[in-house]
Image (tube, rainbow, N blue to C red):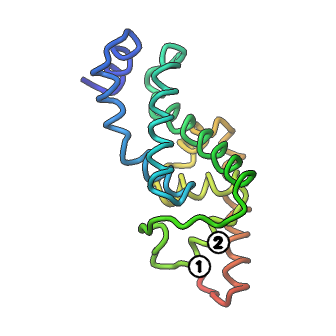
Amino acid sequence: MTPVQLTIAAQKGDAEAFAALMEMHQSRLYRIAYAYLHNESDALEAIQETTYRSYRQLKKLKEPSYFGTWLIRILLNYCADERKRKSRFSHVTEIHEPSSWDRPEDPDLAAAVSALDREYKQIIILSYFEGFSLTEVADVLQIPAGTVKSRLHRALGQLRNQLETKGDPSL
């Protein structure tokens, strides 16, 4: 079955079709969640909550071909809420398990991306780390493609400034 057919079947109550859809998107969801939350257990919890929310709201999805972008949008909203919640209640820096995000080829770049505002960080992660096209990023974030382009330009400028400040003129 195609993803669209699976989505339609899942909307009609087929739990196996829904499980197959979630399995198709599992690794991408994990990478995005980990890039935002920097902790394996938090990323897994984000995926679990995203699965729950998407299952409950699946019948409200009007266009089955947009299941993937709809699912990522749910995940992004959860991750943003979780980061806000943790920043309000946590005064101690958490220790988390290392991963490729924590040990990238360029740790200064990872730190600079983490320091970006949410709207810029989303675009950088989706376009550069996940390989989404600008049109796909616009669909996921539900903003015009022109807005994605201008935010991407500003985000790259901020990254360049941060990295030049640290003495890395490679950008």
* Label 1: few (<14), some (14–19) or many (≥20) C-alpha neighbours in 10 Å: some
Q: Residue furthest left?
A: 1
Pointer 2 and pointer 1: residues touching (CB < 8 Å)?
yes
Q: Quarter of the image containing the C terminus?
A: bottom right
Left or right of residue 83: residue 131: left
Q: Residue at x 43, y 49 (%)?
A: 30
Under mark 1, the amino acid is Asp
Please, is residue 26 above or below residue 101 in the view? above
Q: Residue furthest top?
A: 12
Label 2 sits on residue: 112
Label 1 sits on residue: 108
Coordinates of residue 112 in the picture (x, y in percent): 65, 71
Quadrant assignment, res 13: top left
Left or right of residue 81: residue 42: left
Coordinates of residue 161 in the picture (x, y in percent): 73, 77
Distance between the Cα atoms at labels 2 and 1? 6 Å
In front of the other: 141 or 114: 114
Left or right of residue 5: residue 33: right
In front of the other: 58 or 38: 38
In front of the other: 20 or 144: 20
Please, is residue 14 above or below residue 80 in the view? above
Quadrant assignment, res 107: bottom right
* Label 2: few (<14), some (14–19) or many (≥20) C-alpha neighbours in 10 Å: some
Q: Residue at x 46, y 74 (%)?
A: 104
Label 1 secondary element: helix
